[in-house]
Amino acid sequence: MIIPFNKPYMSGRELDYISEAHSNGMLAGDGPFTKRCQAWLEARMKCNKALLTHSCTAALEMAALLLDIQPGDEIIMPSYTFVSTANAFVLRGGVPVFIDIHPDTLNLDERLIEAAVTPRTKAIVPVHYAGVGCEMDTIMSIARRLGLKVVEDAAQGVMSSYKGQALGSIGDLGAYSFHETKNVISGEGGALLINDANLILRAEIIREKGTDRSSFFRGEVNKYTWQEVGSSFLPGELIAAFLYAQLEDADRITTERIARWKRYHESLEQLEAYGILKRPVIPDQCEHNAHMYYVLLEPQIDREKLLNAFKQNEIWSVFHYVPLHSSPAGKRYGRTHGDLKVTNRQSERLIRLPLWIGLSDEQQDKVVKVLKNAST
Ligand SMILES: *Cc1c(COP(=O)(O)O)cnc(C)c1O
């Protein structure tokens, strides 16, 4: 029996809410369900403002516009991330400056930030890999001292926290993803958390095609006009209706994923002791959301062989990322600071195991068994 890598979870209320949106007769963005989702996020994540977007990519693009990134401005970020982290800034002419990561959490190494800063540096973009928080206290204090902005790429970090603060709510801005492959989903979807209250009004304008339409609907202005460069970043109500059903269930989603995650973690303890692999590390100050379970194979283990063994057993396991600094566009639009040794090494050793709600004990045992047999 095939074990898929991911299976989207449904709370069961999605279609009820979509049907409610259908009878409301309001299908464009910023209707009742969008407001409910945003209010939920604001209360839960304790951010000043949450705005739904049609993806995390869109939220990052809004962040680049909000920070007024100009051609040649530099943005410090890890190379070990998804393309949107960099692409959003490159669209504005920004230059991603890639720095190395920690070998255990695979999050950007905050000790390398300061040396990468130049007079052109505008922002730092920590990516909370696997929903495990970056060292935010250090990152925020460097940013405050040097007058830089912080945009958290918290695409994977919905429902995770760092020292009790929700990921995405700590930097000036935070970007969430509700893509089907994440924990809380709406197919495609995302949100921008605006923690710096000074940015709220402009964020609304940028999201509404550069107009003050949001102020108009609140009765604050008597007509709406083109105010600045923006785009259409808001999702329709059907997406928001789907998402609301998921947000209502977000605690249960997290609990169930954590249970699966812990089961892998216990089952693989022995392989770590044998020197076959390293398991993920969760720092004490972080509470995570079990977004993914990955292992880092020791150098003597052949990843290709292991992936083939999974394939032969109908287990869909994947690896990522091709580091951005070694990709064609990364070379063209970005630059590196330092040698990125850890990024290069770990990206070749990582594999992700199937993790989704409904994955059975038997299926997990099979994954562990195939991993064990192929590596010992
Ligand atoms: C998934 C992901 C994104 C992009 O999210 P979308 O909602 O698909 O645009 C960006 N950054 C990271 C780190 C991601 O994992």
Image (cartoon, rainbow, N blue to C red):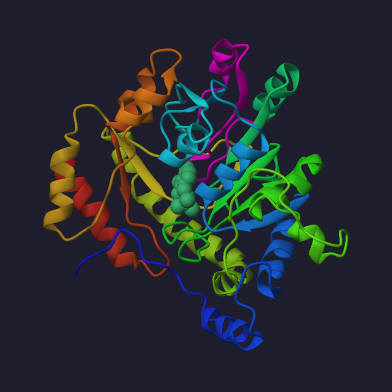
Query: Residue at image x 36%, y 18%?
Result: 341
Q: Is residue 367 left or right of residue 251?
A: left
Stretch in magenta: 108-136
Tell me where residue 263 appears, x and y as whole percent. Answer: 41, 55
In the image, residue 293 sits, relative to residue 217, either above or below, namely: above
Question: Quadrant of residue 66 in the image?
Answer: top right
In the image, residue 139 sits, relative to residue 37, either above or below, namely: above
Whether residue 74 appears in magenta in the rendering, the answer is: no
Task: Single out the residue that lies furthest toward the bottom.
Answer: 23
Q: Is residue 271 left or right of residue 311?
A: right
Q: In which quadrant of the rendered image does the N terminus lie?
A: bottom left
Tell me where residue 310 appears, x and y as whole percent. Answer: 18, 52
Whether residue 135 appears in magenta in the rendering, the answer is: yes
Query: Residue at image x 34%, y 65%?
Result: 361
Query: Residue at image x 38%, y 22%?
Result: 342
Tell me where residue 226 appears, x and y as whole percent. Answer: 71, 50
Q: In which quadrant of the rendered image does the C terminus lie?
A: top left
Whether residue 130 can be seen here: no
220, 376: nearer the viewer: 220
Tell me where residue 177 appears, x and y as whole percent. Answer: 52, 53
114, 130: nearer the viewer: 114
Query: Residue at image x 70%, y 74%?
Result: 32
Question: Quadrant of residue 339 in the image?
Answer: top left
288, 284: nearer the viewer: 288
How many labels, in total? 0
Whether residue 21 can be seen here: yes
